[in-house]
Structure formats: C-alpha cells, structure tokens
Amino acid sequence: MTINTQPMLGQTHSLLSPMVRWGLLLSLAVLFGVIPFLPDFYVTLIGKIMCFAICALAMDLIWGYTGILSLGHGLFFALGGYAMGMYLMRQIGRDGVYKSDLPDFMVFLDWKELPWHWTGSEHFLWALLLMVAAPGILAFVFGYFAFRSRIKGVYFSIITQALTFAAMLLFFRNETGFGGNNGFTDFKRIVDIPIATPSMRISLCIISGLVLIAFYLIARYLVQSKYGRVLQAIRDAETRVLFTGYNTLWYKLSIWTISAMMCGVAGALYVPQVGIINPSEMSPAASIEIAIWAAVGGRATLIGPILGAFFVNGAKSWFTVAFPEFWLYFLGALFILVTLFLPQGIIGLIRKRSPKSDANKQESASSTPPPVAANADPQAQGSQA
Amino acid sequence: MRLPDVFNGARRCLSTTLFALIFVTLPQLSLALTPEAAKAIAVGENDDRLSALAKAIAEPSDGLVRLIDALLDDAVKIAEGRVYIVRDGKALDAATGAETTLPPNAEDVVNNNRVRGELDTARAAFSLLSEDRNTRAKAITELKDEANEAKLPIIDRAIAKESDAELKSRLQQLRAAMLVASSDKAKRLEAVAALASSGEPSVKSLLQERLQPTGESDPEVRTALANAIKAIDAKLVWGERLGVIFSGASLGSILLLVALGLAITYGLMGVINMAHGELMMIGAYTTYVVQNLFRQHLPSGFDYYILAAIPVAFTVSALVGAVLERTVIRWLYGRPLETLLATWGISLVLIQSVRTLFGAQNVPVENPSFLSGGVAVMSNLTLPYNRIAIIFFAFFVLALVYLLINKTRLGLFVRGVTQNRTMASCMGVNTARIDTYAFALGAGIAGLAGCALSQVGNVGPDLGQNYIVDSFLVVVLGGVGQLAGTVYAALGLGVLNKLLEGWTGAVLAKIAVLAFIVVFIQRRPQGIFALKGRSAD
C-alpha cells in the first residue's frame, strides 16, 4: 500500500520551510508563554501527552515511513522510564519509609545490597545514558535477528507483542529487582531538587516540549534525506529495493533502533512527571495504543502522530473523568473508524478539505486500496510486488 | 430477623436446613449420651472439653452426633449445668433429645478454632460409619491429616464394619498412621511396614515428621522409616512425571481449541483477528447464560446444560463473527496490519460491552456433576474429569474442522478462495459469502473454546486477553494455513510450558517459551510446516 504524502523526487524542501518555521515559533511561544501560567493539572497532562507524542513520532518513523508495525514500543518506553526511575529511587536517599540507603522495596524484600544492574544508578549521567542505551541495545539485538531472518508484516508485529508481554512478566517478578508489580514511585528529588514543586513540573513540561521539537526536526531531517527515501521504498516494495542492490537489513535495523531510543527518552521524561513507573506500561494494550495515536493523526506525516497523541490522550483524560465506562467504547470505535474510513488520519482529512490540494486528493483516492483486494492471501502480496 | 429473642443472629436460621439434611443421612447409632458427658463436652476449660470429647467418641451415639453438629452450628446453650440445643426457636435437651423449655438465664457456648477443628474431625470420624460409600470415602480423606490415637477405637470399628476392599485398605493405612506414634515399639514397626506400601504424599510427610530428632528415637524403627520413605518415593515419582505430561496435554488441548479458530481466520483467510479472544469470552458468557437458564427453568436437568451450551456458544459466537466480517473485516482484506488494529478496537468494544452487561467481576460457571471430581490414577495423580473432557473435546473439534475443510463442499470453496480468489470467483464461487462463512466458522470455534474454558477457569471480561498472545504464537509456530502444524505447535507448547514450569516456575517458563519461539522463528520463519514454492515469497 502506498501512502504518498511526500513531494516528488527532485523537488527539494529546505529543512525549515516557512510553514514549519512559523509552527516552531508558535510552539516555542506556547511552551514558554502559556505553560508556566496553567494550573498544575494541565501542566502535568500536557507534559505527559508530549512524552506520548514522542512515542507516536517514533512509531511513525518505523510504521508510517518504513511499514513495520511494532507492537512492542511500550517496552522501549518503559525501559527508558525504568532507567530514569532507578536514578530517582536512588535520589530518595534515606527519606524512604525504612530510612535505608536501599530503595524501600529492597528493604522490604530483605535484600542487603544493590543488585549488579543497579551499579551506577546514583549518577544522573548514567541514567541519561541508560535511557537510550537499554532500549537501543535491546532493539538492536532483537531487530538484528528478526530482520536478518526476514520476519516481516504481521509476524513481526506478533513477535514484538510477545516480546513486550514476556518483559512485562519478567518485570512483575520481585526477583528482577525493579520493584515487582508496584514498580517505582514516591520520588522525592531529581538532580537534588525537590520533584513535587510547581516550578519543577513546569520545567519538566518545557523540557519535554523542547525534546519533542528536537525529535520532530531530527525525524524531519531523516525522512527527507536519501536514507528516508529508501525507508519509504522499503515500505512500498521491499523486494524491489533488495533487487536494486540495497541491503534493507541495515536500513530497517537502524530506523528500528533509533525509534526505540526515542521511545526510551520519552519514557525517561514521562516518569518524573507522573511520579510512577510499573510493568503495566509494558502490557500489549499500552503498545498497541501507541500505534493508534499515529494512525489517528495520520501515518507518514510527521505532524500527524503528534496531533494524534494529543487528540487521543486529551479525549482519554476527558472521558475517564466524565464518562469512565464509555472510554473503551470510544477508543475501540476510534480503532475501527480510523482504519476503515481515515487511512490517512486527521491530517488526511484536513488535506482533503483544504482547497489548494487537489493533487493530494487524487493521490489519496488512488492510494486507498479497493475494498476487497484482488487476492486476500498475505503470501500472494509478494508476487504483486 | 425472624426469631429475635432466641436467636442472636440471622445466620443461625440457615443452619436449620443443614441440620435436617445431616440428620437424615446419619446412621442410627444405639448408645445414648449421658447428661454428664454432654456437659463435659460443652463447658469447662478447652483441654478438659477436648479430653471429654475424645472419651465420648469411643462410644458414638445419636445424641453425641447431634451435640457435635449443634456445637459446630453455634446452637448450644447452657443453663444450670444442663446442656440445651436450640433449633428453630425450640429447645432440646442435648442428652435425651427431648423437647424442653429453655431457662431464661441460658448462656451461649463459645468454641474457639482449636475446639472447632477437633469437632470437625470428630464429625468426620462418625461419617466413617455412614451407610453411604462416598460419605465414608470423604471422611477418610478428611481424617488423614488429623490422625491421632484418640480416634483409634472408632477406626477399628469402621474397619470391622467396612465391606468395600479399597476403603478398607485406606482405613488400615489411616490406622497405621495413628499407630506410628504409639508408645509400643512393635506396634510402631508394624505401622511403618503397613505405611510403606502406600503411595501417598501425605504419608511420606508423616513419616518424615517421625524421622525428625523430636520424633522417633529407636534406631531400628528409624531405619524402617527411612526405607519406607524410599519405597514411597519410588512410587511417587511416576505419578509426578505423568502429572506433568497430563497438565501439559491439558494446556495443549486448550491452546489447540483456541488456535483452531485462529488457524481458520488467520491461517486460511489471512485475517489477523485480535478479537479472537473476545469471541471466546462471548462463548464463555453464553455458557454462563445457558447455565442460569437451566437453573431457573429446568433445575432437574441442570447437569445437561453443558450439552445445550456447546451449540449455543458456537452459534452466538459465529453470529457475532459473521456480523463483524460483514461490517468491518470485509473492507480490510489484504491489509493485515489495518485488520490487526481494527480487530483490536473490536475487542475493546466487546470487552466493555460485557462489562456493561454482566459487570466487571468474574461470573461463576459450575461444572455439571459428571464433570466435577476426577479419577485417581495414582495416589498423587488425580486427573480431573473436566480436563479429560476438554482433551477429548479438542480432538473432537479438530476432527470436525478437518472433515469440514477437507471433505465438504464449503471446505472446498474455502480452500479454493484461499488459493486463488479470482479463479474461484470465475468458477462461480460466491467469494464474499464464503469469506463470511469461513470467518463465522472460525469465530464459532472460538466460542466452543470459550465454552470449554468456562469449565476449567474463571469467566470474566479479561478471559480472552489471557490467551491471545499464546494462541497467536501457536499459529505462528505451526505455520500459516496448516492444521497439522497448529496441532503439533499447540500440544508441543503446552507440554514444553508445563515441563519448564516444574523446573523454573510459571513466569520464567513462559519467558523461556517465548524466547524459544523467537529463536525458532529465526530458523524457520514460516513455522514448522512451511508452504513451499513460489507462493511462500
């Protein structure tokens, strides 16, 4: 399937087109001009959603641009979160319930010293390294084996789902040394500054926003480069790319690892803002929700997933307060309606409405597949390519 | 409260029916209970009461049984040295059973947990003399953990009276278990020898307890004890091995049932149905509804609700599946990733609908009486009937699916559409209708799996979520479009899972299995039975 939203080849866009430039200025203005004056609740909510938006952006790189649907991105998000969580647990120091140097849950389990994988967790820089290294290395190793044996399509999705499921079971265990099903919570400080103050909340929120903008620019650079074009070619016809002489393994593996690391950063930003991390972030449902953020906003556009994350999570926080029992109906309906009627998401809808994009309209019409494909057999897809 | 004066709590009202029930099933015992004995059991220090009880057990009587029952129901009162049983607002004299009036200053008799435990065993000891074989068998099981010499007379009497050979040998073992702590060395040796022939885990732990420094002191008896434990171990090990294989086969058959439906929707049609687990949940809830209907309208035939539930569960799930196919999945053929997301959305809607209809809590589904209980193959290996039934049921469904796909006209069409949709259409096959039928069939089999699961596990809104990862792995492992692969993968995964579980614990076993699958997929990306040729890409 082709989602053609990119300009024609040869038509170069500068990294910062006027529209993007204005958008950046506007978002920076909002970050520094509006966020500090919002009530606490909204600061945390927006900060949280911006972390989710980073996830959606990462998902978009791997799914929207490379055509690989990962159902395991929640795992990378949680790993980043746990990396930061370990540091935050150490920052509690002796202020815990048991007044011990060890985190409370270890005292509770009657452990006498820190397990080996907590080495260095008291250093902030180590936490910063770990939050990209842990998901990055896991993604690299897993991706290398998966892509090397050409696992693709739904197979890959199912295996990644199994991966995050297995990790969730592992982290639920107390022996793993990550607090079991309670995870980490009750954080007191970050870089020796109290964490539960309005100014810290605002700072974290602004940092999340800046990171989101930075990742947006990086992603924009990536997808507009030649590298990004190859990724899109892999999405549209991997066999042809192989026959043209590209080794798709390294393209897929690199974008997969980058995407995982972005999620890790998002998780690390998320944990100090919400104040808790536990294995439920690794549940298959959490990972699949990331995919729907990207799908709602519009795959293969960069702004779309960010909008999608804001839309879905905004709706979630409204529903769970106003009509808690209807939230799952809404989310379920969103999954169904978006895949059925909005294959290009909100962005596709906007493009269709705006008068100047007649060309886009035609493209989107032709790119929507016929209701029943010529051959529903997934194995026959290759022969069409 | 119906009887505010005499009864302290409404819960006592309930006990009367229970009492009547027990009373009718009791054997008629001859000797009477003296008022003194009744008083000794009912009042005084706990230790004195218990020794009085032990003494009284040696001479069972109707009165004693009635008193013990009443004590267990908190229906005993005491006034002026006489013991009364208060039932339904009527007071009976505990010793004679005659109706009397209750003096106004009567006080409740209170039993702590220790006394209650002893009363319970005493009650079980009496059941040894029951006319009903099942009651006797149950009583032996209950007494096994409470063996002490005080109950020896009643056991002896039961052995003398017992006609059933199996129960008799179990009683003799029970007797030996009581004698193993006897003060007479000869008796102890004899008891150890008798116990060595048993294969019970509880006997083993009993013997091990005797081997502790505080237990047996005589070296000769100690050697006998050690030998007896070895003999028992040899018997137990086979039971354990077979137990692991059985539970593996049981899990495998459940996975097989779950995966069979997927093998059709995913394997044959290429539809990733994340709502498969929720279709199972619908099947399980249908079973629950059918069960309730039977309980309300046809209580006499309650045991047969399961026979009605099987086709109903199939039909309901198949109908839901057909609706889903017509409304959603039809538009997504050839787009597996989108199908995955849309069906995930469907699963969320289905889960929430069930929560709205039936509540978020699990609902109780009872086994019919012929599926509860189990057959004891060995002393430490009991195969529950419901699990045995599911193994057979899984293979029955497998056979049906095989016949349907390979021997019927519908199956021919399904295979034809799978292999070449355009050509099948040219030959006059209504491919759209076949799609609906095939999907409904897969959904219906999911309903059957749910019906089966309701007999062994909890029925709740999360039922499907617990199996979805496993079942997809089975299909992936087995190879797409292959029934044989699904069978091998399901049984293999089930047994592997249980083997590892005994070795590393449940969670690590699951992780190990997942790791194994990821590695296996490396070697054979298309599953155990890969399609060969150009179509395999």
Image: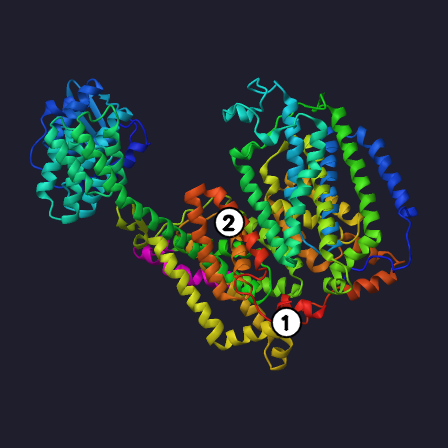
Using the image, tell me which numbered label, if any, was put on residue B117: none
Q: Which residue is rendered at x = 17% and y = 19% of the image?
A: B48
- Closer to the camera, A174 or A187? A174
In the displayed structure image, the side of residue B479 where residue A292 appears, left or right = right
Residue A127 lies, in percent from the top left, at 69, 31
Using the image, tell me which numbered label, if any, was put on residue B534: 1
Q: Which residue is identified by label 2?
A: B513
In the displayed structure image, the side of residue B415 where residue B86 appears, left or right = left
Q: Amino acid at mark 1?
A: Arg
Q: Amino acid at mark 2?
A: Val
- Secondary structure under tag 2 reads helix
| Predominant SS of the magenta segment | helix
- Closer to the camera, B73 or B217? B217
Sequence-wise first label, 1 or 2: 2
- Secondary structure under tag 1 reads helix
**Residue B427 in sight:** yes
Read off the magenta span: B294-318
Q: Chain of mark 1?
A: B
